Amino acid sequence: MKAQFLRIGQRFEIPTCAQLMRNLVCLRITPTSVYARGDERKDTNSPWKTNYDYIGCGTEVQPLNEIVEIKRSDNNELIVAGELTGIEKRKRGRKGSTLEFPPTPFSIEEVSKLNNCSTTKVYLKVIAMVKTGEMDVVEEIKNKRGKSKKIYQLMDFIGKETVVESKPQKLPKSKKPKKSIKRKK
């Protein structure tokens, strides 16, 4: 089987390199290569070392039936869940805050009212979640003036039918009297 047909998280072996590479796991698939993690050594007498490397999509591999869970570490690297990585969590600084998000599409202001905290705190958390793929921008409401308003939703609930009780209402426009400018001649 060619490497391009592997699934993310699937363990596999390369029969031609079995003596030099072992415990290979597919982490990411691109159109031209497969990003994998595994143990590697230079020759049969040297020790095994963990290595991350790209393998060409045309490489012949022997897939194993075992599928493992892939997670991201604190420094945003792909790792195999449950394995020791040698990365320690930071012990300094403030503890991370937990926010509650509704299953329906929401705006930053709605979440800040729900959790009784500042919009800045919610905004920073939402942006971090969008980058990691836990949340996505569903809609962008453009105003005539000022910054547009984005509507977000958790990835777990995207595509599922949700009942939205009420949509945000537009505020009535205030009419200001026009000022006439008198010019001197």
Image (cartoon, rainbow, N blue to C red):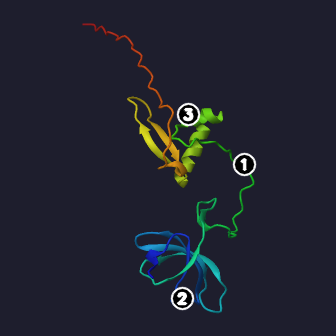
Q: Is residue 140 above or below residue 76?
A: above
How far across and down, in percent of the image, does residue 62 sit?
A: 51, 84
Q: Secondary structure at mark 1?
A: loop
Could you tell me how far apart the alpha carbons at marks 1 and 2 are, in whole angstroms?
A: 45 Å
**Relative side of 88 to 20, left or right:** right
Mark 2 element type: helix
Q: Residues within 10 Å of mark 3 (few under 14, many from 20)?
A: some
CB-based contact (under 8 Å), mark 3 and mark 2: no
Give the answer, above or below, for where 132 lies relative to 59.
above
Give the structural element (helix, strand or loop) at label 3. Answer: helix
Q: Residue furthest left?
A: 185
The residue identified by callout 2 is 17
Location of residue 111 (image quadrant): top right
The residue to which callout 3 is attached is 109
Name the front one of labels 1 and 2: 2
Looking at the image, which residue is at 53% across and 41% down? 104
Q: Earlier in the sequence, mark 1 or mark 2?
A: 2
Q: Is residue 118 visible?
A: no
First in sequence, mark 3 or 1: give its number. 1
Give the residue pinned by disc 1: 93
